[in-house]
């Protein structure tokens, strides 16, 4: 349901902190200053208790959502509106339409504007404005209600617009930074950070009998390519190689640029025999593939590959990488343009 998506905080940890702090401030201020505030009529104790219970419920929902994942979305969705309803009930029960009472509508507005996507922020701000209008319209003369309500509504709307705009820009910036951390800007392959996490996940959650295979490869004599065609030419070869490897990958494989001209292929649910065949096919594919540079020059390229398998050769991500790296070194030492697997002669 789209409504539930709109009402989820961008940062759950920050959401918990903000809701807990605002609820605590609201309860403390209400209990401390309520006896000192002037009232135009008798206080409805029952309604006041109900409002306090509602505020406590908001805090309880946040705590509840921490431990029960399925309830999280609903708890976050209803909490702001329960808080707004509680503020309305408190103001009506105490016959208080002063600015000091109305200011509490700023709390849910701040939460929504700072932590929710724009549609959620609009909904919460709209609910807070409706609550404000109910409080002033039911307790003040029309002219006074229009003046006070107009001031507060303008303040709520302006605060929400500016704060949410800043939050959206910050969220976009963070998304861009995360994308840069996850994707190599030259080749479009995933970075080492993502690859390490995917390798750990594949080994921990591997329930297949096939196991997980890792192929490390790099371009033979890549420095000579850079020397002859320049670094832009070397970059073009890298980009085309990355495209070729991605094209030859299965769904679920992870292709990563480890750095320089070294590329890794993580093959979850892939036996040693299948990985050996795929690595051999890749080496042959690159050998016969013409890499065409932007000036029309065709460059012939070969690659060397090292192959390792879990659980055959390693049980952890670090030892699996080390085994494949050792095999890659042996492939280079044996003359390049070949596949070597751990423990097998080149």
Image (cartoon, rainbow, N blue to C red):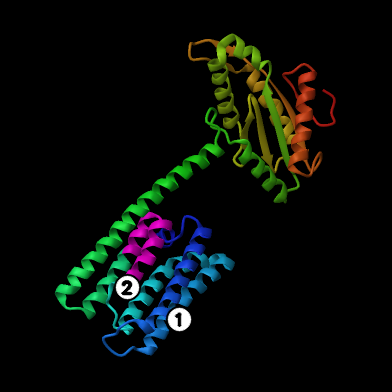
Q: Residue 109's image quarter?
A: bottom left
Q: How many neighbours does mark 1 have within 10 angstroms: few (below 14), some (14-19), or many (20 or more)?
A: few
Most distant residue in the front direction: 36
Counting from the top left corner in percent of width and height, residue 57 is at 47, 76
* Disc 2 element: helix
Instruction: Find disc 1 in the rendering and name its residue.
Output: 53
Q: State the residue at coordinates (66%, 34%).
A: 265
Q: Which residues are magenta?
A: 103-125
Callouts 1 and 2 close, C-beta under 8 Å:
no
Q: In x, y percent, where is residue 212? A: 72, 42
Q: Residue at (26%, 64%) from the top-left corner? A: 153
Whether residue 235 appears in magenta in the rendering, the answer is no
Q: Residue 286 sits in which quadrant?
A: top right
Q: Residues within 10 Å of mark 2 (few under 14, many from 20)?
A: few
Name the residue furthest left.
143
**Percent from the top left, x then y, of residue 240?**
55, 23
Q: Which residue is mark 2?
A: 100
Q: Judge by depth and name the residue closer to the eye, 305 or 73.
A: 73
Q: Main secondary structure of the magenta part?
A: helix
Instruction: Return the residue nearer the eye: 92 or 288.
Output: 92
Going from the N terminus, do you reach mark 1 or mark 2 first? Answer: 1
For marks 1 and 2, give the one nearer the viewer: 2
Q: How many marks?
A: 2
Mark 1 and mark 2: Cα distance apart in space? 21 Å
State the quadrant of the N terminus: bottom left
Question: Is residue 165 shown above or below 89?
Answer: above
Quadrant of the image for the C terminus? top right
């Amino acid at each position: 349901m789209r409504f539930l998506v709109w009402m989820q905080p961008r940062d759950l940890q920050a959401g918990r902190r903000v809701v807990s702090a605002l609820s605590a401030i609201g309860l403390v201020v209400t209990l401390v200053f309520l006896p000192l505030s002037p009232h135009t009529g008798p206080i409805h104790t029952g309604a006041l208790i109900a409002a306090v219970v509602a505020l406590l419920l908001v805090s309880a929902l946040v705590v509840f959502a921490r431990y029960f994942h399925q309830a999280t979305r609903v708890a976050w969705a209803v909490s702001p509106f329960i808080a707004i309803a509680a503020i309305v009930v408190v103001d009506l029960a105490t016959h208080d339409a002063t600015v000091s009472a109305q200011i509490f509508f700023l709390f849910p507005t701040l939460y929504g504007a700072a932590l929710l996507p724009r549609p959620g922020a609009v909904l919460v701000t709209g609910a807070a404005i409706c609550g404000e209008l109910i409080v002033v319209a039911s307790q003040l003369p029309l002219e006074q209600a229009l003046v006070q309500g107009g001031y507060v509504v303008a303040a709520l709307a302006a605060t929400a617009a500016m704060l949410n705009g800043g939050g959206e820009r910050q969220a976009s910036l963070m998304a861009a930074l995360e994308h840069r951390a996850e994707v190599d800007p030259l080749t479009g392959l995933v970075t080492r950070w993502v690859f390490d996490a995917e390798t750990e996940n594949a080994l921990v959650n591997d329930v297949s009998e096939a196991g997980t295979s890792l192929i490390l490869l790099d371009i033979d004599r890549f420095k000579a390519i850079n020397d002859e065609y320049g670094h832009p030419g070397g970059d073009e070869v890298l980009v085309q190689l990355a495209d070729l490897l991605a094209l030859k990958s299965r769904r679920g494989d992870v292709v990563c640029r480890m750095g320089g001209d070294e590329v890794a292929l993580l093959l979850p649910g892939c036996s040693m025999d299948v990985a050996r065949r795929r690595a051999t096919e890749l080496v042959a594919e690159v050998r016969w593939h013409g890499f065409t540079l932007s000036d029309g020059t065709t460059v012939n390229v070969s690659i060397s590959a090292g192959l390792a398998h879990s659980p055959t050769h390693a049980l952890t991500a670090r030892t699996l990488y080390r085994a494949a790296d050792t095999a890659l070194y042996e492939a280079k030492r044996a003359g390049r343009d070949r596949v070597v697997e751990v423990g097998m002669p080149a």
